[in-house]
Amino acid sequence: MFENLSERLDKSFKLLKGQGKITEINVAETLKDIRRALLDADVNFKIAKKFTDDVKEKALGQEVLTAVKPGQLMVKIVKDELAMLMGGTFADIQLESKPAVILMSGLQGSGKTTFTGKLGNMLKTKKGKNPLLVAGDVYRPAAIDQLKVLGEQIGIPVYTEEGNMDPVKIAKAAIKLAKEKGHDVVIVDTAGRLAVDEQMMNEISAIKKAIDPDEILFVVDSMTGQDAVNTAKEFNDRLDFDGVVLTKLDGDTRGGAALSIRSVVEKPIKFVGTGEKVDALDVFHPDRMADRILGMGDIVSLVEKAQEQFDEEEARKLQDKLAKNTFNFNDFLKQINQIKKMGNLKDVVGMIPGMGKAMKGMEIEDDAFKHIEAIIFSMTAEERENPSVINGGRRKRIANGSGTNIQEVNRLLKQFTETRKMMKMVSQGKNVQRMMAGMQ
Ligand code: GDP
């Protein structure tokens, strides 16, 4: 996601290269480019214009410190503005009531049912909640089955009423049951339509009135671009929802919806769906997303994801090895295994600073590590521990043994050396300055 926009913005910053300070004249070209990049990412025209006006005002008003180049300053200003555009700060959902009632809204196919399961799973596994899911999409029997299957998969009960076509009654009965059985969260899935229609709006308004939810979430497919923004506006006018869930951000979306929705409906994006699997859900942090759009990598999310998987003892050992530069191929293998556990590889790699850009257009398969692992498995214990002994002859032997070729072995060795260098830098906290310098 956002690959095009990242690349375009990066180019626009380069236009300021070598400039001593930001002036009305030298910033004009950059601003024009930023605006074009936003429009091409399907950001609404008015929003794009306001964005560049705001950036310009900030840029011209800033003292350029001698230590910072104008291009770097511009990156910072654009990053802050992008974060502001997407809401500035993280907005959580309301879970205080017992039970907290969450109502889903959105068009058919937006990903409501999938998200209902994902949210239940996240609240259960990360917040220790005991949710009850409610199948309120009474028109599509398949939707009820879909939620039941999801519920079974994640071990969360699903409330359904065979033959009852009244979602208001179903939702009320589910909340009553939740109180009796001690569920602290009730998530109500509802029926969508292919397009906004009066009957659907009346129905969801009636559910809202009857159950008075703590949180109404509007679910929307980010691939639909400006349509997503328009639909959000229509739903918000009727429902006054509390937050937006952007789904399918793993797809080929240009990002316009993520960037425009907040300023059109004045409601925060709270979650983003990043895949079909039940754990493909992230809470939305505007500042981290802005980092990601600028191709700076979402180092904070990466670290958090890593922390979920890595154990501290291992992490300390790794840090030690990195600092002492004794990181070897055995550690590399361990890292590969950890990364594999972190989920969708393309997402993970995209979070590493600089990698999003470097990977543009590259296909990353889930078994992308297969060759790498085969090569490392073909090394002797000595070679793994001390890669500097791997000379020409050994490279040939390793290539034969692993069923790869000498070029692949060479590439891996080169990558390994680069990784070791980069990790050493990261471990010494130098990455940020280096990356920023690299942008000039
Ligand atoms: P609903 O009609 O709003 O309940 O939509 P569904 O939950 O049935 O989702 C519609 C389709 O989108 C299904 O095929 C889902 O697997 C898919 N889907 C939902 N969320 C995501 C997501 O974040 N990423 C991707 N790639 N697919 C998703």
Image: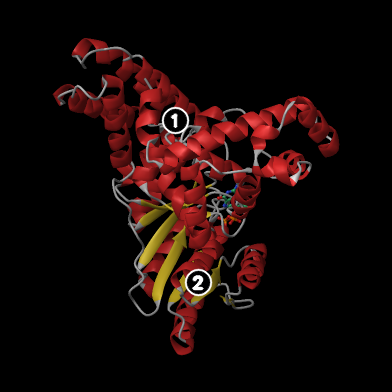
**In this rendering, position of residue 210 left or right of residue 375:** left
Marks 2, 1: nearer the viewer = 2
Residue that lies at the very extreme toward the bottom in this rendered image: 180
**In this rendering, position of residue 31 left or right of residue 226:** left
Please tell me which residue is depicted at 46% across the width and 81% down the height of the picture: 183
- The quarter of the rendered structure image containing the C terminus is top left
Q: Whole-percent x and y of residue 318? A: 52, 51
**In this rendering, position of residue 429 left or right of residue 156:** left
Along the line of sight, the residue nearer the viewer: 346 or 120:
346
Mark 2 falls on what kind of element? helix
What label does residue 42 carry, if any?
1
Question: Residue flagged by tag 2: what amino acid is it?
Answer: Lys
Along the line of sight, the residue nearer the viewer: 409 or 18:
409
Q: Is residue 418 among the parts visible in the rendering? A: yes
* Colour scheme of the rendered structure: secondary structure
Lower sequence index among marks 2 and 1: 1
Q: Do the residues labelled 2 and 1 touch (CB within 8 Å)?
A: no
Please tell me which residue is depicted at 67% across the width and 68% down the height of the picture: 149
Q: Label 2 to label 1, Cα distance in Å?
A: 36 Å
Mark 1 falls on what kind of element? loop
Along the line of sight, the residue nearer the viewer: 259 or 397:
397
Question: Residue flagged by tag 1: what amino acid is it?
Answer: Asp
Q: How crowded is the residue under tag 2: few (<14 C-alpha within 10 Å), some, or many (20+)?
A: some
* Above or below for 286 versus 160: above
Q: Whole-percent x and y of residue 200? A: 48, 58
Q: Label 2 belongs to which residue?
A: 124
Please tell me which residue is depicted at 79% across the width and 35% down the height of the picture: 398
Q: How crowded is the residue under tag 1: few (<14 C-alpha within 10 Å), some, or many (20+)?
A: many
Residue that lies at the very extreme toward the top in this rendered image: 25
Q: Whole-percent x and y of residue 204? A: 44, 63
Q: Is residue 367 among the parts visible in the rendering? A: no
